[in-house]
Image (cartoon, grey):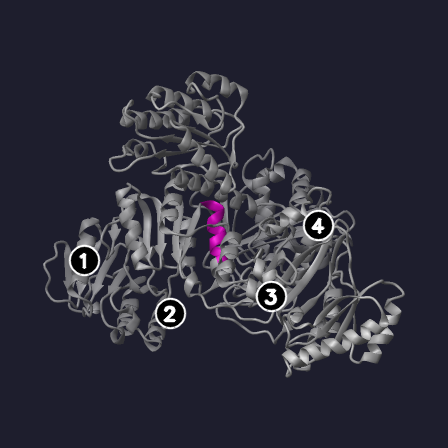
Amino acid sequence: MTICNLEGLTSPRSIAIVGPNSKQEMVLQRLIDSLTTCKFTGVKTLVGLPETEADGFASAPSISKVDGNADLAILLGDPTTAAESINQLGAQGTRAVVIPASGFDSWSEVHLDALLKAAHPYNIRILGPGSLGLASPYSNLSTLLTSEQALKGDLALISRSGTIFNTTLSWAKANSIGFSGVVSLGRRLDVDVSDLLDWYAQDYRTKAILVHLETIANPRKFMSAARAAARSKPVIVLRSGASRDQHISGMAHSSRLATRDSVYDAALQRAGVLRVYDLDEMFEAAETITRVAPSTGRRLSIIANGRSLATLAADRLAKVGGKLAPISSETKESLLSLTRADAVADNPMVLSEAASPEEFKEGISALLKDPNSDGVLAIAAPTAFVDFEEVAKAIAEAAKEDRKRFGKHQAFVTTLAGGANIPRQYLDEARVPCYPSPSGAIRSFMHLVRYKEAKDHLSAVPDSLPSDYKPNLRLAKETISAALENRQKWLTPVQTRELLRAYSINQVELHLVKTVEEAAKVAEVMFGKHNQLVLKVSSPDLTFKSDIGGVHLGVDSVEDVKATFEKILQNVKHSFPDAEITGVEIQPLVSRRFGLETYAGLADDPVFGPVVVFGKGGTSVEVIGDRAMDLVPIDLNLANAMISRTNTSKLLKGFRNRPSVNIGEVEQLLVKLSQIAVDFPEVRELDLNPVVADETGIVVLDARVAISAPEKRPGRQGRSRLSIVPYPVEWEHTHKLKDGKTVLIRPIRPEDQGILKKFFEKVSVEDLRLRFFAPVKEFSHTFLARLVQLDYARAIAFAAIDPETGNILGVVRLHANPDHTEGEYAVMVQSNLKGFGLGWILMKLIIRYAKVDGIQTVKGEVLRENTTMLDMCRSLGFRVKRSPDDDALADVALDVTALDRETMS
């Protein structure tokens, strides 16, 4: 379940506190106080509890005696009676249950299983055990067992930790920050972070979502919900527990590089959420993002009444990746009269210590209008010459006036430096973020930058892989299957080469020899083409071959090859006498003048599944630790972003006389590794180290691949290892139209944005109006990106494509609700193709997809004047009725659960 019956939790019409009370007496009293203080207007009943003085509460001896039903029940009983209470509540119509804190560790797995089984027939949602309650201030609801209540506002708070939950509420009250909802999760038996992300993502009162978590039980569900929420509003995540993470063990470099917390980092970044690392940063981000629009760039203007404070801010900005804005000459001219005698009108803008409030306001206003700036930081320190309170008022007034003008508005943050009695109340009233130090303000500005970049990243359009690229899946499957049948844990060098060859990954020439005579014979041939060779031991038991003398470079004669062969075997037997040696690898010594050693690999994270890793390569790959990673699957955009997050990327761009590396080849390599993980869950670890990259491309010098039989993981379906549903290639097929023309029908991909735009341009104005219910003049990048950037876990779109031109001829899409019970469809075909049966083909396809995907009802809205579409819906079995919300619309719905295969074909 996701949001099913959550309205019973967040906006109930009636509440019951159900005994017997196994908690401390103060728990019951605190619940009564919270429900009284929040002025809950629904029916409140105390059930099976001793007579208690509580105004406004009815009482009942048992659940069956409650007058009416309780939408929300709060269970105070012990674990042995909870399941039976839920059974009785379900029969009475209860939709949600909260099991409060106080000893939730005493709940055994047997008790928890019994709870879930009791709740399942009634779809009762369970919050806890161990929850500190929840509050919905706009519904006048609070069941909080906290030191402070939640004020009304536009933040949603979801927390695993009771301490962080309490601390955040206390901070919010002190800073006049309000909430649309707050939820303490407790043990997350049923209601979890993902459910609440879906809930608050569609709540119009919620402007941003704060989340504290430690672990994620269902990564696919979380990634889908987080990505959906982040597209509509900021999601800020604080994760604790990195110090308690178990170290990932593995024989490959990839598993050692992909530490648990670094994979969480990658997952949160992929979801488009903003990760913070401590409470101060979370509070800063919450205050800033709810009060200021996301910055369009990294350029910041700084104005301060002191050079040192301005310099500290500029230093911090440079360190965290921001830039000083190159303010325009017009702005400099207007600021000239405000500068101190020994300063110039520039950025940072330094006022004198005696600068008046009016001068502060004038300087801020000028910078806020500058076209070359993305944000402004105003820093004020108390002085003996100016009333600090008046300065704060002037800063607040500048912000208010700027909001009234037309045109681009910049992000605006402030610092009021000093100790106690800082007059920040004026800035709070003006909804201007205020921080006690420049570093906090800079960090908050960068939160705005990171959030905007994360949103842009979610809608970026990737390039396509070369059209002629097709992996040889048969070769790869035969290679892996043979190894598994042989009970291998590692592919042999020859098998590894075959796997990489199947995916067109360029490798150095390699020969595996088992005897010194064979080595000499191979070397003699190779010296005809190469001046020097490399000899390496081949063993599934050895990860660090160089450390034990298992690798020799620069071997330049046959005699030297013989001696080196023997030396390598001696070294291995001395260091690891029990190691299995499968032979010695001989390859040419690759010497590229401008070649850089990089690393690429696959790791298998126990939570999120396969991860692509990239970084600096060579024997010191783990020591340097310069790596970035992302969840599988990735596209070329994501590969480029991964590369950019490493220090190695600076070398790849070229410097001095070194040309830049062919970055496109590196990106393609990472995408190919991602595809290996998608296609073959048997591949558990993969190291390509080093991968030499230069201006001509890449070549893999060494590779290792660990394999095992695929396994199912909890909470996953389909490709169970993957946290993000990959492109559903199995739905690609061809179909013939009535005129005999064959079309390719496949799921839409992110790189289809260009051809989708061309498709819309070929659709008539009238057909566009019928589809979008209004005239459409142009299609923005943001709009088109939403149509092609699909989360295949909850949405699908199919395009019918002309195989000769590559143009889209028609599109059908289906978007499931968070509960995955209903899907809303939309269909459109090129205006000049009506009558060829393409619309019918696409509609039947989307119905068949819904059936396979477990969706129960396909529905849609159609203009009543669109009789062609309504006739087709009726012929396909849709119920058609007038919309109760709009007389011009008809609601159509099809129950797909009753359809058989013949009906859908």
The residue to which callout 4 is attached is 664
CA gap, disc 4 and disc 1 = 61 Å
Circle 2: element type: helix
Classed neighbour count for the residue bearing mark 2: other residues with Cα under 10 Å, few (<14), some (14–19), many (≥20): few
Image vertical order of residue 358 relative to residue 559, above or below: above
Quadrant of the image for the C terminus? bottom right
Circle 3: element type: helix
Q: Mark 1 or mark 4, which is nearer the start of the sequence?
A: 1
CA gap, disc 1 and disc 3 = 53 Å
Verify whether residue 225 appears in magenta: yes
Closer to viewer: mark 4 or mark 1 = 4
Residue at image coords 31%, 62%: 96
Q: Amino acid at mark 2?
A: His
Q: Mark 4 or mark 2, which is nearer the start of the sequence?
A: 2
Magenta region, main secondary structure:
helix
Q: Which mark is residue 557?
A: none
| Residues at circles 1 and 2 in contact by the CB criterion of under 8 Å | no
481 vs 395, left or right, is right
The residue stretch that appears in magenta: 223-233
Classed neighbour count for the residue bearing mark 3: other residues with Cα under 10 Å, few (<14), some (14–19), many (≥20): many
Image vertical order of residue 340 relative to residue 97, above or below: above
CA gap, disc 2 and disc 4 = 51 Å
CA gap, disc 1 and disc 2 = 30 Å
Closer to viewer: mark 1 or mark 2 = 1
User: Observer-nearest residue: 103 or 444?
Assistant: 444
Q: Mark 2 or mark 3, which is nearer the start of the sequence?
A: 2
CA gap, disc 3 and disc 2 = 44 Å
Residue 564, given in percent of the width and then of the height, sits at 77, 74
